[in-house]
Amino acid sequence: MVKPRIAIIGAGSSGLTALKQCLADDLDPICFEQTSCVGGLWNFVEVDDENKDPHPSSYKSLIINTSKEMMTFSDFPIPAEWPTYLHNSLVAKYFNMYADHFKLWPYIKFRTTVVHVSYLPDHRWKVKYITCEDKDQTKENPNNEHEEIFDYVIVCNGHHRKHRWPKYKGMDEFKAAPFENKRVVVVGIGNSGLDIAVELSHVASQVYLCVRRGTLPWIMPRLIDGKAIDQLRSRFSDAFLPTSSSAFTKRIVQIVGPHPPSLQPTTPLFAHHPTVKSDFFERLSTGTIIVTKNILELMPDETKSIKFVDGSIVENIDAVVYATGYHIDFPFLDREIINGGPEIEQEFEDEYKENLTWMYKMIFPPNYRNIAFIGLFQPIAAIFPITELQSRYVTSLIKGVINPLPSPKDMDIAIRNYHKKNRKQYYLSARHTMELDYFEYLDKMSQELGCYPYSLEILKKFGFNLWKLVMFGVRTPIQYRLLGRQSWEGAKDAIMAYNKINPIQH
């Protein structure tokens, strides 16, 4: 029997787990990667005269804001002795270790750009691509394009490529500059904006942080009472101890300090994507960071001034850093595959439709049965375990070992219900069009896959000690390898290690 041919676009966290899962399910995959390495944006790339527009990259000092226990792939744990929160270089190292362990390298076509993916009358996909060895890679000379036909396409190249710039008068006149002893304005108050502002405040003479909506978000610490913030929820607490938003907010304020009254958030704690940066208020209190209102105009005259909407002006600004997010952009695909088409788009406001996705389970466009998108979401927690479970779902679907997808009409209904719920919970913003809850999503997907860690089954198969860890301990995604198809015999020991229990002594 001929194996289905699978094209995987991108070798970042999503592409690697999709490739690994295709091999585990005896499919025939090829992974196209534009750069010369795996790991996507976790590989730091220096911008210089020779490399003015590199692939999306983490910045040099970036430390991830999800704990390793919650971000690990389920059958290849991040080493337990590594720090709780990893520097970007360790994240990149982990992806290389993952590719080594599962022998993925022969299936990755590096330095290869996919230029177009088209749907054929026979319901297969034509993938056109260019490799770096090809000469004269121009539209006028298309003879250097290669093309192959695939039964299935898995899109894994992420949504952090096309910058989402604000629109300010005069902004094109401000050029980048070294930051040491400079006066810098940072625009954006998400995780990147606050992180960059704090980092720059240690070397710049003054940092101004521009809040475009007028208030700061709720800012969370990495640790609460010595425990990683994303490890506070256990299966037991979710089931039997309802979360009090007000109590949690009060505890956070006790740890990181109160917001300045004029910048107090106006939305509930869980009405926006969380921002994790506990040392921000310390820098604010020293005056090394000053929070400003939104920008009205940049005036690159001899004063190098910036005017804000409240009428205030700061002068002698050396550089502006925009931490304002990204547009969802897949230039090799027709746009309607992503957003459902113009009829669906017109149902939403301009800002929301900018980053609108129309995907069943955040994976499948309703009108195309054999293309899947992995990692096209914004989780309130780590992305890697979700991409892994999505990959397991897609290949299980291809193999026919789970229920087939519903009709396009039923998928449309489910997607519309998702957006209705999403818009009710989060304030209207382009960044919230793809939000999902980490635990809820993983549990629902694992139930359909047959790998959910049901309490009674864990108790019967592994005994009381492991049952106790699953119910009360770190809710690591390794739990989804205890039961079901493609369970992993090392899962029990890995869970014990992540709960700081020596498996040898038990």
Image (cartoon, rainbow, N blue to C red):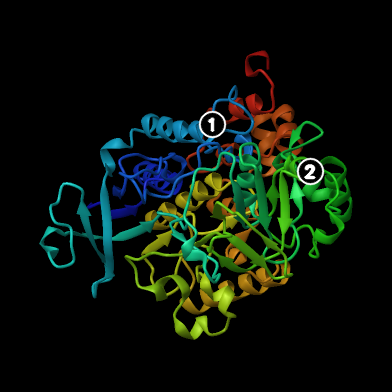
Q: Amino acid at mark 2?
A: Phe
Q: Is residue 61 visible?
A: yes
- In the image, which disc is placed on residue 470? none
Vertical placement of residue 10 versus 255, above or below: below
Dot 2: few (<14), some (14–19), or many (≥20) neighbours within 10 Å? few
The residue lying furthest to the front in this view is: 302
Question: Of marks 1 and 2, which one's residue comes earlier in the chain?
Answer: 1
Q: Quadrant of residue 482?
A: top right
Residue 313 percent coordinates (x, y): 68, 63
Vertical placement of residue 207 versus 348, above or below: above
Report whether 223 appears left or right of 362: right
Q: In the depicted view, which residue is nearer to us: 214 or 444?
A: 214
Vertical placement of residue 354 versus 241, above or below: below
Q: Amino acid at mark 1?
A: Pro
Q: In the depicted view, which residue is nearer to us: 303 or 452?
A: 303
Q: Is residue 452 visible?
A: no
Instruction: From the image, tell me which residue sits under label 2.
Output: 236
